[in-house]
Image: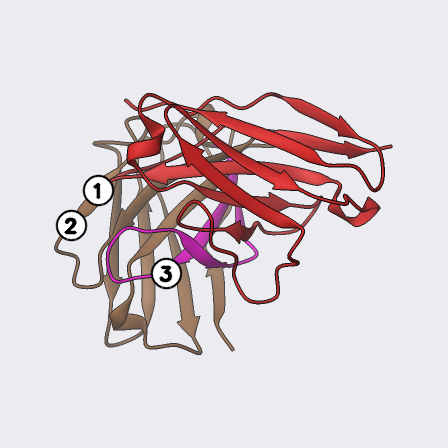
Chain colours: A red, B brown
Amino acid sequence: SYELTQPPSVSVSPGQTANITCSGDKLGDKYAYWYLQKPGQSPVVVIYQDTRRPSGIPERFSGSNSGNTATLTISGTQAMDEADYYCQTGDSSTEVFGGGTKLTVL
Amino acid sequence: EVQLVESGGGLVQPGRSLRLSCAASGFSFDDYAMHWVRQAPGKGLEWVSGLTWNSGTIGYADSVKGRFTISRDNAKNFLYLQMSSLRAEDTALYFCAKDHSGYYSHFDHWGQGTLVSVSS
């Protein structure tokens, strides 16, 4: 079965850029999606179809996907961005999530 | 406003069955694929099962294949998950999630989840 690999944790200083990676075999041939989840809340999609941002998601969130790696970039990271981030991809009948990355803003 | 409200969770013994329900409102339910996603305590997200708008394509994670059955009632705007032969490792918060399209894409709305605990 298909697997996605994320780093367990990423730390960033306020105002700096955070990059969270997601690796999978030929992931660039698929669409990648990104969700954030804060404690006690349901996940929220922040990037879909590799680079697209849903309405209401700040412009500081961006995404890319090429080769075997998709990347979520948060520019000018704010304290409110501290959360767990999950990548996701799929095909016509299955979906898969990465293991998640805890973003710490300190 | 899209609303997804899960129900049916609870404490169940290993080997027993449980049926989860998800009441959907605020959108044209029969136009969209729907999914179940779970999250074990302190762990990450795991896609469990999904089905397209017309139930033409149904998929399951390997971990639940043969034990869980997903279904939908487009007339009543309900999504279901019939879980049988439950194991301790099925203990999790189960989310109902709406897909962005009628086929498999991504999850643009989520419910608050219903907790399933499998223990003797």
Q: Tell me where the magenta segment starts and ends, as one range.
A: B91-115
Chain of residue at mark 1: A
Residue A14: image x %, image y %? 85, 39
Whether residue A65 is situated above or below residue A55 in the rendered picture? above
Per the image, the residue denoted by label 2 is B57
CA distance for labels 1 and 3? 15 Å
Q: Are marks 2 and 3 on the same chain?
A: yes
Q: Residue at x 79, y 49 (%)?
A: A80
- What residue lies at 70% left-to-right and 26% top-to-bottom? A10
Subunit ID for the residue under disc 2? B
Q: Earlier in the sequence, mark 2 or mark 3?
A: 2
Nearer to the camera, A67 or A92: A67
Report the residue at 76% width, 27% height from top. Answer: A11
Q: Who is closer to the viewer here, B64 or A12?
A: A12
B55, B104: nearer the viewer: B104
Placement of A5 over or under B30, stated as above or below: above
- Residue marked by disc 1: A93
Q: Nearer the viewer, mark 1 or mark 3?
A: 3
- Whether residue B98 appears in magenta in the rendering, the answer is yes
Q: Residue at x 59, y 21 (%)?
A: A7
Q: Amino acid at mark 2?
A: Thr
User: Marks 2 and 1: in contact by CB < 8 Å?
Assistant: yes
The alpha-carbon separation of the residues under discs 2 and 3 comes to 16 Å
- Please name the amino acid that badge 3 sits on: His
The residue beneath circle 3 is B100
- Residue found farthest to the left: B56
Q: Answer above or below: position of B49 versus B2.
A: above
Can see residue A100? no
CA separation in Å, label 1 and label 2 = 6 Å
